[in-house]
Amino acid sequence: MSSKKSVALLPRGTVSDEAVRYLFRDQDVEFVYCKMIADVFQSTASGRTDWSVIPIENTIDGSVSLHIDLLVHEVDLPIRAEWVFPSIQNLIGSAGELAGSDGQWDPDKIVKVMSHPVAMAQCMQFIRARLPHAELETLSSTSEAVRTVLSNPGKGWAALGTKLAAKETGLDLLQEGVTDHDNNFTRFLLVGNTPYENPTATAQHTSVLITLPEDYPGLLHQVLSAFAWRKINLSKIESRPTKKKLGTYYFYIDIAYALDSVLLPGALAEIEALGCQVRLLGSYPSLSYEPARA
């Protein structure tokens, strides 16, 4: 029986695909591509794959609320790692079909631009400046948009997608880096029941859910004070509905410490003593992105 590990992720050629290839760049891991994020989660929850790769937060768009809710409400998969990866979109199409008299791509020859709605939103400055006349169509992923352009030659269509998608389909990079902001990064989580280790990680983070009892004025202040007086750094805190009763929320908190650090267990115990429910989502390596050297 093969001991090769497997990881579920969004379709081939997406930023998720680029990101997971970066994470496992030195390892022999099987990639299992899924069309929808719910399928990614269920692939691992059902035991078909060892891990799932989940885009959880973006520099421009903030938290991906749907993915947080799936992680909290639909599955019970611990977080095994986090890392950031640049989300760079490019204008992709057939250079020969869309070329003007000077040999460069001609904006007037592009009648439709296709992409995932998030990617489209991240490139609106470019679209307004260069392609204000083009019809915009959103699809389930950037890679689907690139494949749709490939299968419809001669229509004046282009896509916003990754370099990886262009390479795998044989289409051309008409213009690179058309994302509105140069610092556009996405934070990814690796979740699953299979342990994961990365000796290159220089930091450990912990994620918890804290649910407050109802009608307890000032309790959130006391919860945050449990971290504050211990000088425990919270890298993120976000409220999300419990989905049980209108007006009730839990707090998703990322902590810049490992669970076994000296002060963190005491802080969580103090919060539980206040009557709060504390659910551990994971304590995991946090990896920084390092661009490949030329």
Image: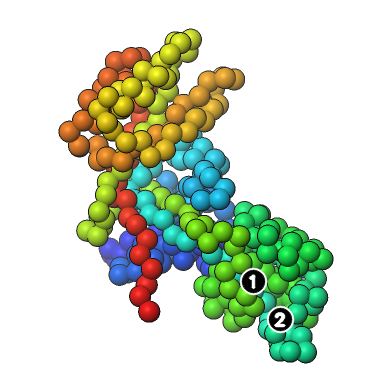
Q: Is residue 47 visible?
A: no
Name the residue type under label 2.
Trp
Q: Are marks 1 and 2 in contact (CB under 8 Å)?
A: yes
Q: Quadrant of the N terminus?
A: bottom left
Q: What residue appears at the point 47 percent right and 61 percent down from the top-left corner?
A: 86
Of residue 176 and residue 142, the one placed in the foreground of this image is 176
Q: What residue appears at the point 82 percent right and 66 percent down from the top-left corner?
A: 133
Relative to 226, does residue 131 appear above or below in the rendering? below
Q: In this rendering, would 128 be left or right of 203?
A: right
- Disc 1 crowd rating (10 Å Cα; few below 14, some 14-19, many 20+) is many
Spot occupied by residue 152 in the image (x, y as percentages of width and height): 74, 76
Q: What residue appears at the point 62 percent right and 56 percent down from the top-left corner?
A: 122
Of residue 105 and residue 153, the one placed in the foreground of this image is 105
Q: What residue appears at the point 27 percent right and 40 percent down from the top-left corner?
A: 257
Relative to 31, does residue 268 appear above or below in the rendering? above
Say which residue label 2 marks.
105
The Cα–Cα distance between marks 1 and 2, rounded to whole angstroms, is: 10 Å
Spot occupied by residue 275 in the image (x, y as percentages of width and height): 35, 14
Of residue 41 and residue 233, the one placed in the foreground of this image is 233
Query: Hey, which quadrant is residue 50 in on the image?
Result: bottom left
Q: Secondary structure under badge 1?
A: strand
Q: In this rendering, would 206 be left or right of 114?
A: left
Spot occupied by residue 83 in the image (x, y as percentages of width and height): 38, 54
Relative to 45, does residue 198 appear above or below in the rendering? below
Name the residue type under label 1.
Leu
Of residue 236 and residue 210, the one placed in the foreground of this image is 236
Query: Hey, which quadrant is residue 236 in on the image?
Result: top left
Q: Secondary structure under badge 2?
A: loop
Spot occupied by residue 161 in the image (x, y as percentages of width and height): 60, 67
Residue 91: mark: 1
